[in-house]
Image (cartoon, helix red, strand yellow):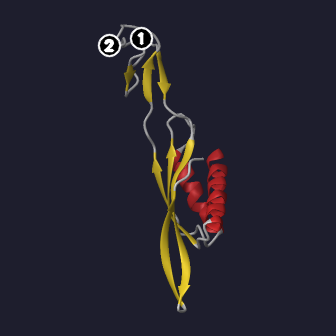
Amino acid sequence: MHELSLAQSLVEQLLVLAAEQRATRVVRIRVRIEPLAGVVTDSFSFGFEAVKTISAVTRDAILELDCPPASYRCLACGRLSEHPLPPEIPCPGCGAKNRQLPTGGDQLLLLQVELEEQETDNGKTEPQPREVNSHV
C-alpha cells in the first residue's frame, strides 16, 4: 500500500510549507491524482486521515481530491474517447478493433494549500487565512 507512504510524504511537505510561511495550521489542501498515477484514491484519503494526526499543524486539515478521468486513444487513427470500447467493438473513427490506449497524466500534484497563521495584536490571537499554490 504505497498510498500510505504518499500520504506521509504529503504531510511532511505540508509541515515544511507551514513552517516556511510561519503558519500554525493547515486548513485545506487540494491534490490532483491524475488517472494513470496508480494511486487508489480511497486508500490515499484513508492514509492521509491517519497520518495527518502526527502534528497539531495538520490535525484538522481537509483534503480535497481532484481526480480527472482517463481518456482512450485509438492507436490506429488517434481518435480520443472518454470510455474504453470493448475489444469486439470497432473504433468509430477507423474501424480498428482492440487498439485503444489509456491516456492522461501520471502525477500526484499538490495544487493548493490554505494555511492559517496566528498573529498577536494587543494580546489577541486571530487566524489569518493564507493560500499557497505549489506544484510537486
Callout 1 crowding tier (Cα within 10 Å): few <14, some 14–19, many ≥20: some
- Residue at mark 1 to residue at mark 2: CA–CA distance: 10 Å
Amino acid on which the number 2 mark rests in the picture: Pro
Name the quadrant containing residue 70.
top left
Residue at the image point whose x is 65% and y is 65% from the top: 20
Q: Nearer the viewer, mark 1 or mark 2?
A: 1
Looking at the image, is 18 positioned above or below residue 117? above
Q: Amino acid at mark 1?
A: Cys
Residue 96 at x, y percent in the picture: 40, 8
Element at badge 2?
loop
Contact between marks 1 and 2 (CB within 8 A): the answer is no
Q: Nearer the viewer, residue 50 or 112?
A: 112
Q: Position of residue 112 (x, y in %)?
A: 50, 55
Q: Residue furthest top?
A: 95
Q: Mark 1 vs mark 2: which is more N-terminal? A: 1
Task: Identify the residue at image location x=61%, y=48%.
Answer: 3
Q: Is residue 78 above or below residue 111?
A: above
The residue tagged 1 is 77
Question: Badge 2 local density, few (<14 within 10 Å), some, or many (20+)?
Answer: few
Task: Point out the image quarter for the N terminus.
Answer: top right
Give the residue displayed 37% in from the left and 28% down from the top.
Answer: 82
Q: Residue at x 56, y 71 (%)?
A: 25
Across and down, in percent, residue 79 comes to: 39, 17
| Residue corresponding to mark 2 | 92
Q: Going by the image, does 26 lie left or right of 84?
A: right
Q: Which mark is residue 125?
A: none
